[in-house]
Image (spheres, rainbow, N blue to C red):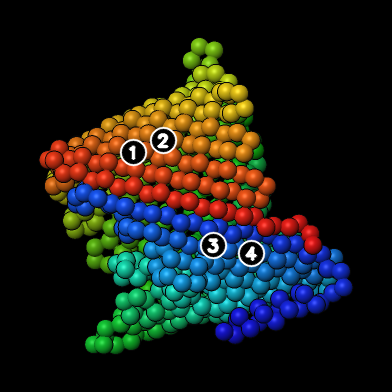
Amino acid sequence: MRLGLLIGLAVSSLAHGGESPDWSVRGDTTSRIEYFDTSGDRRLGGYAEDGLHAYQELNLGVSRDTGEGQRWDLDLSGVLSGSDYRTLEDGAHLEHVRLSYENAGVPVPYRLDLGDQRARFSRLTLDQDLRGVRLETQPQLGRTDHSLVWVSGAYRRHWYGDNEALAPWRVAPEGDFHGASWLMADPVFGNLSLNLAHHDQTAFTGAEDTHLVTSLALSREFQLLHQQLDAEAEWARLEGDKWSGAHQDPERSVRDRGWHARVSGRDELLPLPLDYALRYAYHGEDFQPAGTDVVRDSRTLGASAGLSLSQRARLQGRYNRYVDRAAGLNPVRVDEHGMELAMPFAVGPVTSRQTLDVSHRERADRQGNIDQLTRRASWDMRLPLAATQEAQIELFWLDLDDRATDARDRRDRRLTLAQESRFRVGELDITAAPGVAYRSRDGHLEQHTLNPTLSLAAAGALHELGVALGYRRLERPGLVAPDTEEYHLAMDWRYRRDRHVLGLEYEHQLTEARSGEELDLWRAGLFWRYDFSRGSL
């Protein structure tokens, strides 16, 4: 409510703040209506909700530039929904709103943001979508540039349509976030930032976390022994309280730390260009700040190097080690190394582009409950047949050896062939793309799939038409589900005129099971989109 009042006052000031402001408006609105129908045996599939579904979307942006270093910017988007596929609940929803004001014409430039925004201090402190307020000032002291940021906001599930029907651990938690960050950029010594973030977060399960995270981050580019290097590091400390959400469990204090470092560079002495990177991350047993993607009690080590053999050929190698539950009695370790080679390949007078990637991955725990070896290889080649034709071949192979239990061993193979041709008939640009894909899995969850497809597209001055046909035969001897044959048809038509786009869509799928069951489902849709953007008013 307070945020809406502030935005209303600010928009009013936009309209009356000057005699000749430079206004610009951007945005579009879309009306869409769809009908879904499922008939037959729903055990073979079906739409989540049948029937009529409709919604109206609005995206609006208004900017005002005074020409004196001052700028206002308002962005909002919302939907009036009667569609279960668009929103979880029917009605009007304001999905995004942000008001920004910046002033670069004063001794200390600053920017103020109200509403929805991405709040990011650093990897270990705060990186979260919030609805709140952000103030940034940019003073300059001597040769050093400074950026001082203060953020206060919150994340609520109903603002962003989070689906609470998911498993509890997959539903995004709610929380309040407050913090400040001070970045100093020096042309000689590099960048240094001090970050402070306070989190008060409640998970869907009822678990609560109240944390204060402080961090120091450094980064610098420099040259050493013909090596052009870029180094960065961050050290963070977390203090606070944690509660599981269960009444019988007491609240406990947590105090832990995390840090990460990364060095990347390129060699300027070797005859062939060489680039490389090395990184390491340590997260303590209780170090998992809310509003970040940090995984607690984990260690990560990564290294990579790439060699440019020519302008079009490159060889790259990589190694990664990840340890989960590192401080526990039964840590899980993942080791992976691989190589990728991208290079041209001549077939007569035609030069193709191809990529080969191979990897070896081991995942195991200390007690032997997990012990898996996965080997994977893929090859992709794109072969120009003519100026308007191209063929593509993809091969994929995977072998999983589950040494802890042979029941999960499996081998996957995939082959994809595709060809695209472009030509012109009268005033129409035509694209035809036939293809076929074959997938086979032996062992655990055995299944085999054959999937030929054909897509056609025609585009004129005002009209666009697309048609896609497909057939899929699915054999699943390793599953309880029956073997099936599926027939697909999709059609899409667009009419564009000035700022208007009118579209019709139709999809139809017929599924026949070997055991006699059938499923027939189709969807038809109509939409109209209008772009009302204006460069200057």
- State the residue in front, 462 or 203: 462
Q: Amino acid at mark 3?
A: Glu
Q: Is residue 393 above or below residue 58?
A: above
Disc 1 to disc 3, C-alpha distance: 29 Å
Q: Residue at x 31, y 76 (%)?
A: 205
Residue 439 in sight here: no
Mark 1 residue element: strand
Q: Which residue is mark 4?
A: 60
For the residues labelled 4 and 2, say whether their Cβ atoms are less than 8 Å apart: no
How busy is the neighbourhood of tag 1: few (under 14 within 10 Å), some, or many (20 plus)?
some
Split into 4 quadrants, where in the image is the C terminus? bottom right
Disc 4 to disc 2, C-alpha distance: 34 Å
> Residue 94 in the image: x percent, y percent?
53, 71
Q: Amino acid at mark 2?
A: Ala
Q: Amino acid at mark 4?
A: Leu
How busy is the neighbourhood of tag 2: few (under 14 within 10 Å), some, or many (20 plus)?
some
Q: Amino acid at mark 1?
A: His
> Residue 47 in the image: x percent, y percent?
31, 54
Residue 488 disc label: 1
Residue 468 disc label: 2
Q: Residue at x 54, y 62 (%)?
A: 57
> Residue 164 in the image: x percent, y percent?
35, 70
Disc 4 to disc 1, C-alpha distance: 37 Å
Q: Which residue is mark 3?
A: 57
Split into 4 quadrants, where in the image is the N terminus? bottom right
- State the residue in front, 252 or 535: 535
How busy is the neighbourhood of tag 4: few (under 14 within 10 Å), some, or many (20 plus)?
some
Q: Left or right: where does residue 138 sit relative to residue 214?
A: right
Q: Is residue 21 above or below residue 391?
A: below
Disc 1 to disc 2, C-alpha distance: 8 Å
Q: Left or right: where does residue 441 sit relative to residue 341?
A: left
Mark 4 residue element: strand
